[in-house]
Image (cartoon, helix red, strand yellow):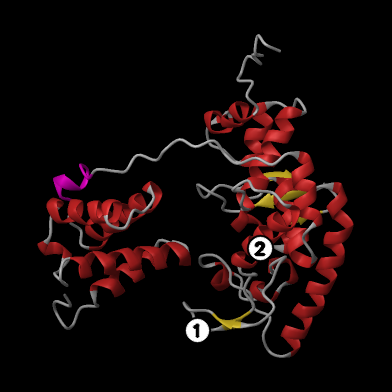
Amino acid sequence: MEGNPQEPKLLDQLRELLRTRHYSIRTEEAYLGWATRYIQFHGMRHPAELGAPELEAFLTHLAVKRDVAASTQNQAASAILFLYRDVLGLNLPWLEGVTRAKRPKRLPVVLTPEEVAAVLDAMEGTSALMGRLLYGSGLRLMECVRLRVKDVDFRRGEIVVREAKGNKDRVTMLPQRLGEPLQRHLKRVKLLHEEDVMAGHGRVWLPHALAVKKPGAPLEWGWQYVFPSARLSVDPRASVVRRHHVDEKALQRAIKRALLKAGIVKAATTHSLRHSFATHLLERGHDIRTIQELLGHADVSTTQIYTHVLNRGGLGVRSPLD
């Protein structure tokens, strides 16, 4: 599998290319994991020796034996196709014909305003503030976790979401009720940052080559995370001690505990707060195009799913019984 001893190992080549193209650390870990499992599944044979039947067999194994979701199977296919096309440079005809799992169409889980209030009231501390941002601003989980100080505009009541899904920026609202609590939170975060700087740390991770172009930027207050981790850690890519953002799993666990405490049996998650944000705006008569922009959807058809949640469709049809 190693090939020429002078050349980097295949997985090292994969990792290097993912980093060169600025893929996220999570995508890097996922692609490396799927490439490893694919090679192991076929008895450690080099991928160049394998073809369409072997890839189809692996994907079928995931679906039938492992019973993975369609999205997981498609991620595995994307990772292996990236390995063939981009790392090995094999533009094989069968690559385009690989069967993709069809994702089932599901209606999003939406909480009522009363249920949202019960969940948020059952949360405490920083998790409660983050939960209110998810619902009040329509943020995705990782958009909230990765929020930088400079992207919160208290005067304009706006939040700039950088490099969101599809690598696009967008602007959404900062709820007035969160202005004061968020400013108090940032005062505590700034003190923590100043302590880090005094201890010889305080540098935050910056995207792409920004740290090279602006050497002082990683220390600047504006670039720090709004929700930093409670402890310093070693960056796995640069081997530098930094204070990264809070682990998103902590918020996911907090939401799960709050749902149990509130006695809500719906299969809700952190993303349900974003779904509820959109649905409740529609219920109050806000324009669907405006909601599309706030959510960052590329196509309004994605936003229209919330009209189905309201059970009124685009025409506002009522049951004849009513």
Q: Quadrant of residue 13?
A: bottom left
Provide the secondary structure element on which disc 1 rests: loop
Reply yes or no: does residue 232 show up in magenta.
Answer: no
Image coordinates for residue 250, horizontal then vertical, percent: 64, 67
The residue segment tinted magenta is 91-98
For residue 21, side relative to residue 161 (left or right): left
User: What's the residue at 67%, 74% (across, down)?
Assistant: 229
Q: Name the residue nearer the viewer: 123 or 198.
A: 123
- Label 1: how many residues lie within 10 Å, few (<14), some (14-19) or many (20+)? few
Reply yes or no: does residue 92 show up in magenta.
Answer: yes
Q: Quadrant of residue 207?
A: bottom right
Residue 220 vertical position relative to residue 166 in the rendered view, above or below: below
Residue position marked by numbered label 1 in the rendering: 239
Residue 147 visible from this viewpoint: no
Provide the secondary structure element on which disc 2 rests: helix
Q: Name the residue nearer the viewer: 80 or 59.
A: 59
User: Which quarter of the figure is the N terminus placed in?
Assistant: bottom left
Image coordinates for residue 308, horizontal then vertical, percent: 59, 27
- Label 2: how many residues lie within 10 Å, few (<14), some (14-19) or many (20+)? many
Residue 251 tag number: 2
**Amino acid under label 1?**
Ser
User: What's the residue at 87%, 66% (across, down)?
Assistant: 184
In the rendered structure, which disc, 2 or 1, sits on the residue that comes first in sequence?
1
Q: How many marks?
A: 2
